[in-house]
Image (spheres, grey):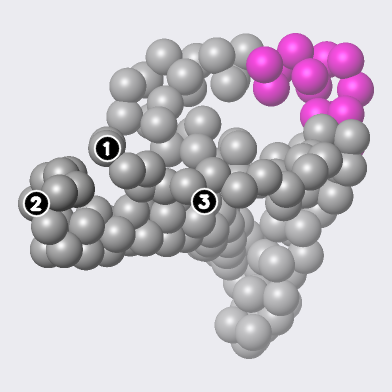
Amino acid sequence: MIKQEKVKGGWPYHFRRHILAEMLSGLLILVPFFIGFFVLLFAFRMISSAISPILRIGIYSGIPEEIVNLLSVVILLLILYLVGVLAKNSFGKKVAALTETMFLKIPVFKVIFSASKTAISAMSLNRDASFHSVVFIEFPKEGY
């Protein structure tokens, strides 16, 4: 007679593990996008609130809100471009490394920052640092 191995928890256990694993995967994919979206939204609102009073002084007092928003987007894109240029030179790399070291010392932010950085580097256009091959990993593995 063949002895059957007792599976831990049966199908409800495996179903629950499957659901939790898929939800965690989805969360790890979506968190960097939401963080990026809210950072850009925050920056847009800061720029818009800073330039709105300046543009509404004197003869420019009749400027519509759409023009202020458009100018805010242009300024945000310019700032992103300048930060990108700065990050590519040696001084910018040192500042980025120092900032990254600071962020990685904060316990909760460490998890979010490292996951975001990994996801962004995996999706970046830089093919040298990207993945080179596809592998199949069985998860969850039997017995775990």
| Residue 7 in sight here | no
Give residue 36's quadrant in the image: bottom right
Tell me the SS state at disc 2.
loop
Q: Residues within 10 Å of mark 1 (few under 14, many from 20)?
A: few
Which comes sooner in the sequence, label 1 or label 3?
3
Q: Callout 3, which amino acid?
A: Pro
Is residue 35 or residue 45 the one in the foreground? 35
Q: CA distance from mark 3 to mark 2?
A: 34 Å
Residue 12 relative to residue 52: left or right: left
Residue at image mark 1: 143
N-terminal of the two: label 2 or label 1? Answer: 2
Coordinates of residue 75 in the picture (x, y in percent): 75, 58
What is the secondary structure assignment of the residue under circle 1? loop
The residue sitting at the front extreme is 1
Give the Cα separation between the discs numbered 2 and 1: 11 Å
Residue type pointed to by label 1: Gly
Residue 100's quadrant in the figure? Answer: top right
Q: Is residue 13 left or right of residue 39?
A: left
The segment highlighted magenta reads 84-97
Residue at the spot x=51%, y=31% of the render? 114
Circles 2 and 1: CB atoms closer than 8 Å? no
Residue beneath label 3, please?
32
Give the Cα distance between marks 1 and 3: 32 Å
At 37% across and 43% down in the image, what residue appears? 141
Residue at left offset 70%, top offset 57%:
76
At label 3, counting other C-alpha atoms closer than 10 Å, the crowd grade (few under 14, some 14-19, many 20 or more) is many
**Is mark 1 in CB contact (under 8 Å) with mark 3?**
no
Say if 139 sits above or below 70 in the image: above
